[in-house]
Amino acid sequence: MKKKFLAMALTGLLSMSLLAGCGSSDSANNSQDSTSSKYEKIDTDLKVGMSTDSGTIDDRSFNQSAWEAIVGTVENCKYLQPSGQTDADYLETIGNLYDAGYKFIVAPGYKFERAINVAQAKYPDAKFVILDGSPVNEAGQVDIAQNTVAIHYVEQEGGFIAGVAAAVEMKEGDFGFIGGMEIPSVKRFNYGFQQGIKYANENLGTNISLKEENIVYQGSFGDKAGGQQVAAQMYDRGVKVIFTAAGGTGMGVITEAKSRATNGEKVYVIGVDVDQYADGVYNQDTNESVILTSAMKFVDQSTIAMIKAEVNDEFPGGQELVFQVSNDGIGIPNENPNLSEETMTTVDTVIESIKNGDITILAENDGSLIG
């Protein structure tokens, strides 16, 4: 099937009010798991299900962001975590959600690509949203049915903006990058980050280094101890800022930075997917955090957009939707307590240059990038 790309305006979705989460009582893992939502309830009886892959629902990143959006938007919702990590495991979980009446199913992650391809045909009266991936058939071809939407994010733009912000704020020093699995989306974060640093060094008067030894793919999205170990090694080598795109593994990076900050070291982390400032708070009295900023994919807003589209009979089935800087689907938090006003002014100018097409950011390594 021919791919279709749609740039969706998210401006109206980015100002959500504070309301409670799912009220459904048919699962113990509903609203009680996500007690603080910042979203507007939709008056609908739509039942929304979500399956995780190998990650957990409380990864403080991709899965949690999607789930909290669902919880804060609809009354009837449920998530399940597969018993394993095979396509059969994913299909079983999707089937269990479907059998329980959850016929609008969100699947965060590229690991669902083959499972969703099967499910969209097996359950034609259901709707599927795959985040960070597209259904792939047995021939390895993208095949998006009319009951499925595939959502992609331009991660390199988020990495670029975060790299510029961190470089301008720190002005000089060594940076590092810790990814989870070496998959395309994580690599795009890395490549954008490198280009952002390079842009700042060449155009904004900074002197930041990013050495090859300080770019590491840890190999997992759920190894907190492993993330902490790699971060400790980098900080011991003099790295001052680590950008982590590693899900639960990244929480280990944040833990290491918090421990060092408590002891007086000036080290920082750049969060990913969501605003991780609260995760990095090491002084409750002053609300000081090791999170310099976060490279955000507005996973929550794109999830809500699809739910609203379904409720309004406007579900864009059969399409691939791209969320990027130009439609406010990628960026950094509006509030960054560790970034100065001057830094933010510079970042805003850079964002406008990206929107205007004056800055081009590579999604792949052209030979000039590391890793």
Image (cartoon, rainbow, N blue to C red):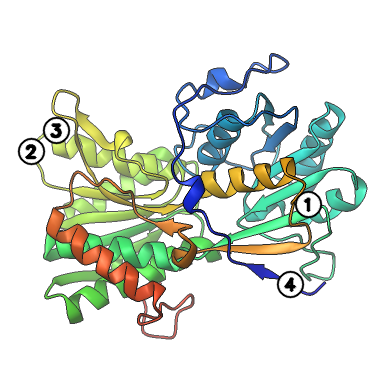
Give the residue at mark 2: 264
Query: Quick check: marks 3 and 1 in contact, CB under 8 Å?
Result: no
Side of 194 relative to 319 (left or right): left
Label drawn at residue 262: 3
The alpha-carbon separation of the residues under discs 3 and 1 comes to 45 Å
Secondary structure of the residue carrying tag 4 is loop
Which image quadrant is residue 274 in?
top left
Residue 111: image location, x then y, percent: 67, 53
Q: Amino acid at mark 1?
A: Ile
Judged from this view, the residue extending furthest toward the left is 264
Query: Which quadrant is home to the N terminus?
Result: bottom right
Against 29, residue 367 (above or below) is below
Side of 140 relative to 184 (left or right): right
Judged from this view, the residue extending furthest toward the bottom is 367
Q: Amino acid at mark 4?
A: Lys
The alpha-carbon separation of the residues under discs 2 and 4 comes to 52 Å
Secondary structure of the residue carrying tag 2 is loop
> Foreground mark, 4 or 3?
4
The alpha-carbon separation of the residues under discs 4 and 3 comes to 50 Å
Foreground of the two, 162 or 91:
162
> Foreground mark, 2 or 1?
1
The alpha-carbon separation of the residues under discs 1 and 4 comes to 16 Å
Give the residue at mark 1: 116
Q: Which of pointers 3 and 1 lies earlier in the amino acid sequence? A: 1
